[in-house]
Image (cartoon, grey):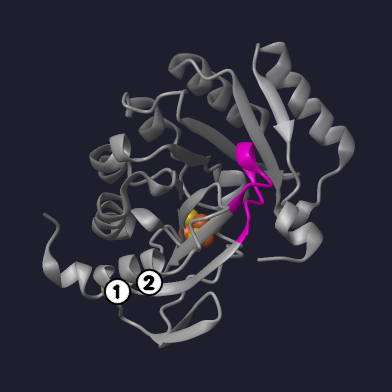
Amino acid sequence: MPPLNILNNINISEIFISLQGEGKYVGARQLFIRFSGCDINCKGCDTDYSLRDNFYFIDEEYKNPISADFLVNKINNKDILEGIHSISFTGGEPLLWSEAVEFIIDRIGNKTKYFLETSGFHLDILKKIYDKLDIVSLDIKLKSTFGIDDNIDNLKRAEFIENNKSYFKLVISDKTKSEELVKVIKLLKEKDFNEIYLHSKNNLVEFKLLSDIMEMFYNSGITCYYVPQMHKMVGIK
Ligand code: SF4
């Protein structure tokens, strides 16, 4: 059982219904639970994960911190799980709140599916709750894009990550180096993943560069999709 103090002190950025804007499930209608906080410090992060006094649960305003019980009751007391693809645990870094994620899944049970989007760094935590999740979106972070040491070796070591429930996303930029892509391809091959989802910061990318990067993946036997951040294109959260 997770420690009670964490379950009674959850900081939420916002809870809302929207469409998944990235990766393999783009367009899926989800209930997003966006937790506050992230410890990765990516350069140019465009997510507001700051701790805040109040947050919105769809159109109602509440005070932080909140209890996991409260969240479960709110979700169960409304019809919001009807007509959604899944609950998306996001952030920030939702794995910093893994006890809350686990609690919510255990309490809500099989009324919906559970989707988690992670930066791909806290893999020891992910391992503990991996079996409870239906879909896991993992970022591959490159130094050239985010100014931090990449997470490729960590991902390599995480033997529990399987291609039947997980997929990888990669943000590319005009600074992406071919030796980084070689490392990514090696990772995918070693882990038996045969597809990857590409994004670019602010949906900006020069087509020739994108095409060359995609060719590199295809030539290595990896199906590669470029997915503009759909939520930004259509002006939703
Ligand atoms: S992991 Fe995501 S939320 Fe955290 S700093 Fe990096 S881009 Fe921002």
Residue 151: x, y in percent? 43, 39
Residue 215: x, y in percent? 78, 20
Q: Is residue 78 above or below residue 153?
A: below
Which residue corresponds to the image point at 61% horizontal and 23% vertical from the top-left?
A: 195
Any part of residue 28 in sight: yes
Q: Is residue 120 above or below residue 158?
A: below
Q: CA distance from mark 2 to mark 1?
A: 6 Å
Q: Name the foreground residue: 221 vs 117.
A: 117
The quadrant the N terminus occupies is bottom left
Q: Is residue 231 above or below residue 132?
A: below
Residue 209: image quadrant is: top right
Which residue corresponds to the image point at 27% horizontal and 60% vertical from the top-left?
A: 100
Any part of residue 37 in sight: no
Look at the image and give the residue range highlighted in magenta: 18-29
Which residue corresponds to the image point at 51% horizontal and 15% vertical from the top-left?
A: 189
Residue 223: x, y in percent? 68, 20
Residue 169: x, y in percent? 58, 38
- Label 1 residue SS: helix
**Residue type highlighted by circle 1:** Phe
Magenta stretch encompasses residue 19: yes
Q: Is ligand 1 closer than 8 angstroms to the Cβ of mark 2?
A: no
**Residue type highlighted by circle 2:** Lys
Q: Residues within 10 Å of mark 2 (few under 14, many from 20)?
A: few
Q: Residues within 10 Å of mark 1 (few under 14, many from 20)?
A: few
The quadrant the C terminus occupies is bottom right
Query: Label 1, on which residue?
Result: 70
Magenta stretch encompasses residue 128: no
Residue contact at pointers 2 and 1, CB within 8 angstroms: yes
Per the rendering, the mark at residue 8 is: none
- Label 2 residue SS: helix
Query: Label 2, on which residue?
Result: 74
122 left or right of 207 in image: left
